[in-house]
Amino acid sequence: MRSLALLLPLAVPLHAQTAILRQGDPAPPGSVGQVVSEIGLTAVNQTNGSACSLAIPYFSSSVRQLWGSVRAGAGAPLRNQGIVGNYAVGLLDLQFGISGAGTCYSAECAEVGTTQFGRDSLWVDDVLIAIEGEPAAGSSELWTFMAYPGITQDGNPYFLGGVTGRPGPPFPRNGLFFGTDPAAVYFAGKTYPNLPSPLSGQAVGSDFGFSAYGTHHIAVLDLDVWVVKDGVIAIDGAGLLLDGVLVQESVLIPPSVGGVGDAWDDFGYVGIAESGEYTFTCDTLGPGVSDHVIVRNGVIWAREGDVLDGETLRGWIQGASLNENGELAFLWSVEDAQGPNRQALFFENEVLLRAGDAVDWDGDGTIDPEVTIVSFAEGKALSLAPDGTIYFVATVETMGFLFEAYFRLDRDGTLGESYCNANPNSTGGTGEVSATGSAAVADNDVTLAASGLPPNVFGFFLTSETRGFVANPGNSEGNVCLGGAIGRYAGPGQILPSGPDGTFSLVLDLTQTPQPTGTVAIAAGESWNFQVWHRDTGAFGPTSNFTDALEITFTP
């Protein structure tokens, strides 16, 4: 495969379905290897941070990296393979978790100076939580593996862990573990409320989830019974009962839940919020044209054959993600004029994107019609952030070549109202300022972004409650679009480089808004204006310029 994407720089996403990391992109700064060769799974957190796993070829093999940001904004390497303390941390697992308190990941590792290689381990940043061969969960049993890790916003890791009762070749049993001193939430052989039997030796699979701060959890568990269909849904330590009936494979679905004479079968993607709202997907033992369903808060919310946003649902559900607002994004094939099984990305009951649709490939905020989605990656390559932004992995086709990419989809575009046209800068185009996040003061979640700037120049954001207009101040090539008391985001870390793609972004603290006499807190009902001043080169040498301006009206 020829890598056309090598010519394309990494970009800060601004609009629509935008590729933010692509197969063939230069490896992020500080990485070994040359280019990104593979995109893996995704994760988000409660500060609207997002990340993905990726692979970079290195000599005859490849290394994995976790890339992204723990807050909304531009991405960077979060974890690399390498030496951590007294351990050489090797191949990172594809699934991981991010939070304001750290990145949780599992990896093969070896203690430096020993001959023990390939020991599975679990980490939060540089802190070792568990390692194969060491005592597990305060017992004499030994860890054998750690998989499918995640982390709560306040720093508690959770993962599927295996243990064995003796050294040597393992005869593992598994469980779902939680905390920096891991304790079993569910464990093989244990009996839990509402369940007719203990759990099997492989008590937990890959389908489980915790709410943002670990108040609630949901999991698909496996019963120790001599039947093929032995899976159940459990929430907060007990089997889930709907209309008094356990949600168990081969058990009839109550009509009050949406059953039509069919039975539960093959549970899949699960999610739960701090509010207790939850979802899970499953097949059912019903007719093949209507046997896949999404359950939300105790009822079947969507069933194969239903029509959502004018599209008929067909086939299986390929991914689902519930955020802390109880909102749901999911992948489900649809039947339309282009065929019976066209992948579609939904938010709630709205179709946002389909296989065959074009994307913004170069990060300039506009759709590139020659770059179209071939397929969406299934499973945990789909994540819905609290602000409603959707992150996903997809394969695209351009000029006859296929590339993987990590995408951001902004459902509602950007915040605020643009005004005051900018003058052209040295690129021949004009600079723009935009914002994403929430206009609610209580959320304190606004990220400003500048685009269309000259490459590799410095600039900073300005703000005022007043609109205005001053042409070419101080012999600048641009115009100031603010009036009244103008504050500058020019403190430590706030004077920003535009980089090779002419963009930068800044996460605001709405309680610390700069003004000439200090900082103030933005209040609900106020309208604030934002603009960017930046360095530039004019016809007679170094100069400066300004972007257009943006006004945001804030709500409670």
Image (cartoon, rainbow, N blue to C red):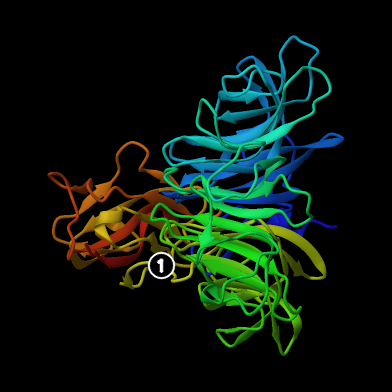
Q: Quadrant of residue 376?
A: bottom right
Instruction: Classify residue 37 as left or right of residue 190.
Output: right
Kind of residue at disc 1: Thr
Q: Residues within 10 Å of mark 1 (few under 14, many from 20)?
A: some
Name the residue beneath numbered marker 1. Answer: 414
Quarter of the image where the C terminus is located: bottom left
Q: Quadrant of residue 432?
A: bottom left
Image coordinates for residue 476, horizontal then vertical, percent: 32, 58
The residue under the point 78% across, 49% down is 226
Image coordinates for residue 428, horizontal then vertical, percent: 50, 67
Quarter of the image where the N terminus is located: bottom right
- Badge 1 marks a residue whose secondary structure is loop
Instruction: Classify residue 200 as left or right of residue 510.
Output: right
Q: Is residue 548 above or below residue 356?
A: above
Image coordinates for residue 12, horizontal then vertical, percent: 52, 55
Image coordinates for residue 225, horizontal then vertical, percent: 74, 48
Q: Is residue 10 above or below residue 493?
A: below
